[in-house]
């Protein structure tokens, strides 16, 4: 009988060091969900829908397209890492305020993609916002409300 190879991957998830046993071919999304990060969603499996978006060293990636072993030594942020039990991230608040959430399936990916954009560029153009959000498919709301939510955060930060 063929022996199943298992490897260890060491990474930071939402700032906490983790050491997980994974199969060499397992994708990061599946391992994160197995470990309880349920904001990382199943979707298309082929890198198109963005439901599985996480931040890898601060950049939005589709975690179904990243092998878990490729995260060795890197930092992963999921939506769980953005808020505390009592306090939402400003982007999450803005999404709620602007009605940019319906079923919520795409929302973690949308929020993380927006965070990645604003961390790199605090004052993006409309096209840059659209481009960042377009990496995640929303079947419910369209994109107008999400764009408004991102702009709301930009304006709030300018006023701080
Ligand atoms: S499940 Fe990863 S992009 Fe669709
Ligand atoms: S809110 Fe339902 S898919 Fe976007």
Image (cartoon, rainbow, N blue to C red):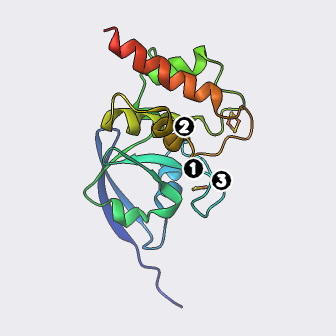
In the rendered image, which residue does mark 2 sit on? 110
Mark 1 and mark 2 residues within 8 Å of each other at the beta carbon: yes
**Would you say the beta carbon of the disc 3 residue lies within 8 angstroms of ligand 1?**
yes
Q: Does the residue at mark 3 contact the one at mark 1 (Cβ under 8 Å)?
A: yes
Compared across the picture, whether 135 is left or right of 81 comes to right
Q: Would you call the spot at circle 2 few (<14 residues within 10 Å), some (14-19), or many (20 or more)?
A: many
Going by the image, does 111 lie left or right of 9?
A: right
Q: Secondary structure at mark 2?
A: helix
| Label 1 SS | loop
Q: Which mark, residue 43?
A: 3
Tell me what residue is drawn at x 34 percent, y 14 percent. 158
Residue 58 position within the rendered picture, expressed as x and y whole percent measured from the top left: 33, 44
Question: Helix, strand or loop at disc 3?
Answer: loop
As rendered, which of 14 and 102 lies closer to the eye? Answer: 102
Foreground disc of the pair 3, 2: 2
Q: Which mark is residue 50?
A: 1
Up the image or down, 20 lies above or below 130; here it is below
């Amino acid at each position: 009988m063929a022996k199943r190879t298992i490897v260890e991957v060491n990474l930071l998830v939402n700032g906490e060091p983790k050491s997980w046993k994974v199969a060499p071919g397992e994708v990061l999304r599946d391992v994160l969900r197995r470990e309880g990060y349920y904001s990382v969603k199943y979707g298309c499996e082929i890198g198109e829908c963005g439901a599985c978006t996480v931040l890898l060293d601060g950049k939005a990636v589709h975690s179904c397209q990243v092998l878990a072993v490729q995260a060795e030594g890197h930092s992963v942020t999921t939506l769980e890492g953005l808020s505390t039990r009592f306090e939402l991230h400003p982007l999450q608040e803005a999404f709620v305020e602007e009605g940019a959430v319906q079923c919520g399936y795409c929302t973690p990916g949308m929020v993380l993609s927006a965070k990645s954009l604003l961390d790199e560029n605090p004052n993006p153009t409309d096209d840059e916002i659209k481009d960042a959000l377009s990496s995640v498919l929303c079947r419910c709301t369209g994109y107008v409300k999400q764009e408004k939510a991102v702009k709301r955060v930009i304006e709030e930060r300018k006023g701080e």
